[in-house]
Image (cartoon, rainbow, N blue to C red):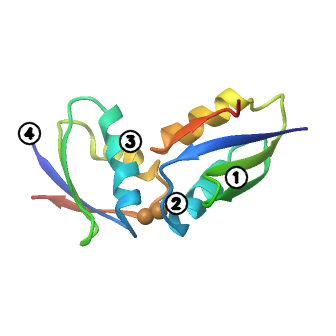
Amino acid sequence: LCSVSLRIEGMTCGSCVQSIEQRIGFLSGVIHIKVSLEQQSATIIYDHSLQSPESLVEAIEDMGFDSSMPE
Amino acid sequence: MPKHEFVVGMTCTGCSDALTRVLNKLQDVKFEIDQPNNLVWIESDKDVDVLMETLKKTGKEVKYNGTK
Ligand SMILES: [Cu+2]
Ligand SMILES: [Cu+2]
């Protein structure tokens, strides 16, 4: 298992946080996700045979938020 | 082009911004969002199911109201 912290831009309320946690948390290979509105970030634990930081960034962008990998 | 009306649960402008970005990625659609009233109008020849799936990508509750 791997863990990654991603930046997410554009979240403004608890409903954004919830929808991201639900939708991304439901993807195959995602074990755990914690989204922080204050820090505009998400910490995700995932199975690296099914997901990658790139695929997770893409899934978040697909939902209408800007996402990027940490520096 | 038919104009479809959807009800989309939006709690703030951040939600409608996310919807705007998702709809902008779809081509050949014209849309209007009324965030306070949770309404979205989309003018498109695309299948309603396709529009529905696109709106659902944001993780919001979506309901189809028919064409207007
Ligand atoms: Cu929100
Ligand atoms: Cu919102």
Graded by Cα atoms within 10 Å as few (under 14), some (14 to 19) or many (20 or more), the crowding at tag 3 reads many
Q: Is residue A68 above or below residue A11?
A: above
Graded by Cα atoms within 10 Å as few (under 14), some (14 to 19) or many (20 or more), the crowding at tag 2 reads many
Where is residue A36 drawn, in percent x and y? 66, 58
Chain identity of mark 1: A
Same chain under badges 2 and 4? The reply is no
Label 4, on which residue?
B1
Q: Disc number at residue B59? A: none
Tell me whether circle 1 and circle 2 mark residues in contact (CB < 8 Å): no
Disc number lying in front (1 or 4): 1
Position of the N terminus of chain B, as image quadrant, is: top left
Whole-number angstrom distance, CA of label 3 to CA of label 4: 20 Å
Label 2, on which residue?
A16
Amino acid under label 4?
A: Met
Same chain under badges 1 and 2? The reply is yes
Label 1, on which residue?
A25
Residue shown at the point (50%, 66%) measured from the top left: A13
Label 3, on which residue?
B22
Whole-number angstrom distance, CA of label 1 to CA of label 4: 37 Å
Number of marks: 4
Q: Is residue B53 left or right of residue A26?
A: left
Looking at the image, can residue A10 be seen?
yes
Graded by Cα atoms within 10 Å as few (under 14), some (14 to 19) or many (20 or more), the crowding at tag 1 reads some
Amino acid under label 1?
A: Gly
Mark 1, ligand 1, within 8 Å: the answer is no
Position of the C terminus of chain B, as image quadrant, is: bottom left
Q: Is residue A12 left or right of residue A59?
A: left
